[in-house]
Amino acid sequence: MVEIVGIRFKKNGKIYYFAPGNIKAEVGQKAIVETVRGVECGDVVIANRMIDDNAISSELKEVIRIATPEDLQVVEKNIQKQKDAFAICQQKIKKRGLDMNLIDVEFTFDNNKILFYFTAETRVDFRELVKDLAAVFRTRIELRQIGVRDEAKILGGLGICGREFCCKGCIGEFQ
């Protein structure tokens, strides 16, 4: 048996398991954790719990700490930065005449990396755009082309039934 904490980074997103160490996390708290993308802030959706070793597929990363008021201020600042980065990236896309549609921007908690999500009908050579963005933001830039279902999940909307898209409201991960 191994002790875990379940963290979700996006509303209705996938739940990731972390080793709590000596931290007692409660549902509803925010926690700072180390991920493959860097340091991130996520919502605790599963409090400390013991699960079978076989339920874990890889080595668990540890929870760094429960988010402090200062951490929450960083999260708020990052949300504002994301809005600014979205506008700047839109301008750069238009300037370069790229046939792509910017969908979302994400800063990692530690501002080590900025992720730009976009859709495009065909393959897009965005190498020069990455250089432009790196010059402006002076950090690692990652552009990810996503499909229409992922776009619907990010942007949301109503299905033909009149309810929120299932991919936005209740499907955590596409298979």
Image (spheres, rainbow, N blue to C red):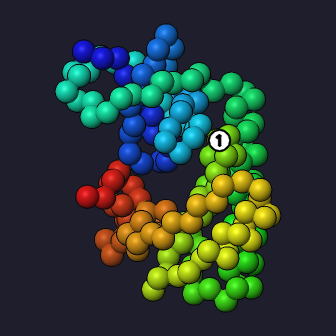
Number of numbered markers: 1
40 horizontally vs 123: left or right: right
Q: Is residue 138 above or below residue 121?
A: above
Residue located at (62% from left, 86% from top): 98
Question: Camera-side residue: 43 or 61?
Answer: 61
9 horizontally vs 141: left or right: left
Residue 46 visible in the current orientation: no
Residue assigned mark 1: 109
For mark 1, give the secondary structure.
loop
Query: Could you say where residue 33 lies in the image, as x and y percent from the top left?
Result: 54, 31
Question: Camera-side residue: 174 or 61?
Answer: 61
Residue located at (45% from left, 86% from top): 122
Q: Quadrant of the C terminus?
A: bottom left
Query: Could you say where residue 63 lies in the image, as x and y percent from the top left?
Result: 51, 24
Query: On the image, which quarter does residue 86 sit in?
Result: bottom right
Query: Could you say where residue 134 lies in the image, as x and y percent from the top left?
Result: 73, 63
- Amino acid type at mark 1: Phe
Residue located at (69% from left, 51% from top): 79
